[in-house]
Amino acid sequence: MASICLFVLSALYVIATANVLGDATPFNFVETSRTISTDFGPPDPHSHDSASTGRDPRGKIHLVRGLVQRVRQASVTVAGEVVGAIGQGLVVLVGVTHHDTAATAKKLADKLWNLRVMDDDEGVMNRSVADTTKQVLIVSQFTLYADTSGGRRPSYIEAARPEHAEPMVDAVVGELRRLGAAVATGRFRTEMQVALVNDGPVTVMVEV
């Protein structure tokens, strides 16, 4: 009888252990797989979640970028021809990423127009280009999205394709003009030479 009882107890122990492992093993496997898919692997900029939230699957927020330089004068030359020039004002190199829209372009233009980096009468940066010269030079610059975290060659995977970037830059220019700016531009999809005299120097990165 004792042997039978011992056998029954052993069998129940094995069954209970199997049930516990059966419950635990799939749970751990799923959680591990979910962690791997979240923390590693390249982002899909065209996925529904990325496009709707402005984030890639790793949770990184993407923003339109404007590298602002306060200048005494500046010009852009293409194939020996000056295609855009300003006097005292702002030069803005604009970088566009995959998720930028007309709304972000408008927001960037408003930020640039009202950015207080111009001197007042006492030499303090209390005024915006809207308050002063109203002159802005906009140049498209996809290399603002260079990723230098790995190796020696920068990656530009976060930079928008030209067919998406060009209308976004045009939207920034259009909104600045609507606000009252005198805007000069570079020329898209060309090799440009940008000459400027940075005043200060003052250089600010703007993300919206």
Image (tube, rainbow, N blue to C red):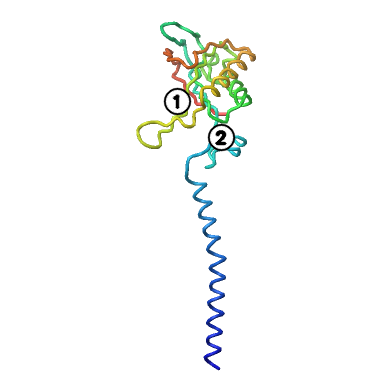
Residue at image point 54% right, 22% down: 163
Residue at image point 63% right, 12% down: 180
Q: Secondary structure at mark 2?
A: loop
Q: Secondary structure at mark 1?
A: helix
| Circle 2 crowding by C-alpha within 10 Å: few under 14, some 14–19, many from 20 | few
Q: Are marks 1 and 2 in contact (CB under 8 Å)?
A: no
Q: Which of pointers 1 and 2 indicates the residue nearer the eye? A: 2
Residue 191 % position (x, y): 42, 15
Residue at image point 63% right, 26% down: 103
Residue occupied by mark 2: 46
Residue 84 % position (x, y): 49, 9
Residue closer to the observer: 124 or 61: 61
Q: Which comes sooner in the sequence, label 1 or label 2?
A: 2
Residue 2 % position (x, y): 54, 92
Query: Quarter-wise, where is residue 101 in the image?
Result: top right
Task: Classify the position of the C terminus by image quarter.
Answer: top right
Q: CA distance from mark 1 to mark 2?
A: 20 Å
Residue at image point 45% right, 18% down: 200
Q: Which mark is residue 28?
A: none
Q: Is residue 164 left or right of residue 40?
A: right
Residue occupied by mark 1: 143
| Circle 1 crowding by C-alpha within 10 Å: few under 14, some 14–19, many from 20 | some
Residue closer to the observer: 53 or 11: 11
Relative vertical location of residue 121 with respect to residue 67 in this rendering, above or below? above
Relative vertical location of residue 197 with respect to residue 62 in this rendering, above or below? above
Relative vertical location of residue 3 with respect to residue 203 in this rendering, above or below? below
Farthest residue toward the top? Answer: 81
Relative vertical location of residue 182 with respect to residue 16 in this rendering, above or below? above
Task: Tell me the amino acid under the disc marked 2.
Answer: His
Task: Tell me the amino acid under the disc marked 1.
Answer: Thr
Residue 190 % position (x, y): 45, 15
Task: Classify the position of the N terminus by image quarter.
Answer: bottom right
